[in-house]
Amino acid sequence: MERAFLLFLTFDGTDFCGWQRQSEGRSVQQVVEESLSLLAASPRQAVAAGRTDAGVHAESLPASTTMPDRWDAATLLRALNATLPRDVAVREVREVRTGTDARRTARGRRYAYRLGVDGAGRSPFRSRTEWALGRPVELDAMQRAAERLPGAHDFRAFAAVGEPKPHYCCRISEAAWAPRDDGRLEFVIAADRFLHHMVRMLVGTMVDIGLGRRPAEDMDVLLASTSNDDTSPPAPPSGLRFVAAEYPEEIFLGDRATW
């Protein structure tokens, strides 16, 4: 017999090639599956709610897996955190209904991006987890651009060129810039789905707006575009982190453990 779990992962993505296993490079999926397989004494797979790029971090990235029924949430939480490398941890384990897929079952996802506009962003304690721009930007202009994002739009102008998708529509429920108490700026965005490099390309374009390189109205132009030829380069991955995913409450069973 098997039990299904959601693992809520937090990790520093600096030294990873991203979530997904690659032919070369160290991935988050690889180290998580290695720990699960060791504990289960049989091969295990983990499916994440989102496929983070190389260098992107996570506060709470859900990943679905199954384990032999001798495992409960509390024991699995302790054992995983004892075997995972130091740049990955499990902050919560919840038992879920059999067949739950962290990616397909998620109703929404939330990302955040940190921008360092002061000189202290060069600090090695900050530079791993933000874009150390190191100069001021016009926050009001960036916020005006962000206000154009909520709703359903075709985001192909903010998607990496690659394999064609059935559609490029994403429904944005939240998009806003705000100053933090530590002097940094933070962009938070939530949607039903995201395209590859979408958040980083949005941030790169809005930072160009904040630096006066392009008007806020360009966001309307790009949302109507069918290519990314005129989109600003993507922001560095270091500032981006997966914050959370939303699930229907009925998938969760009673067994739950947090650190």
Image (cartoon, grey):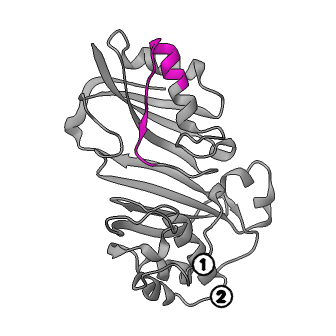
Compared with 240, 135 (above or below) is below
Q: Residue at x 69, y 42 (%)?
A: 15
Q: Residue furthest left?
A: 250
In screen coordinates, is 57 left or right of 248?
right
Q: Residue at x 46, y 42 (%)?
A: 61
Query: Looking at this view, is 241 or 169 the one in front?
Result: 169
Secondary structure of residue under mark 1: loop
Contact between marks 1 and 2 (CB within 8 A): the answer is yes
Where, by quadrant of the figure, is residue 116 drawn? bottom right
| In magenta stretch: residue 42 | yes
Q: Residue at x 80, y 65 (%)?
A: 119
Residue 1's label in the rendered image is none
Where, by quadrant of the figure, is residue 255 drawn? top left
Residue 36: image x %, image y %? 48, 21
Q: Determine crowd level at label 1: few under 14, some 14-19, many 20+ residues with C-alpha closer than 10 A.
A: many
Q: Residue furthest top?
A: 70
In the picture, the quarter occupied by the N terminus is: top left
What residue is disc 2 on?
213
Q: Which residues are magenta?
A: 34-50
Query: Looking at this view, is 251 or 223 the one in front?
Result: 223
What residue is disc 1 on?
232
Amino acid type of the residue tagged 1 in the rendering? Ser
Secondary structure of residue under mark 2: loop
Amino acid type of the residue tagged 2 in the rendering? Arg
In screen coordinates, is 94 left or right of 132?
left
Mark before the other along the chain sequence, 1 or 2: 2
Q: Nearer the viewer, mark 1 or mark 2?
A: 1
In screen coordinates, is 224 left or right of 235?
left
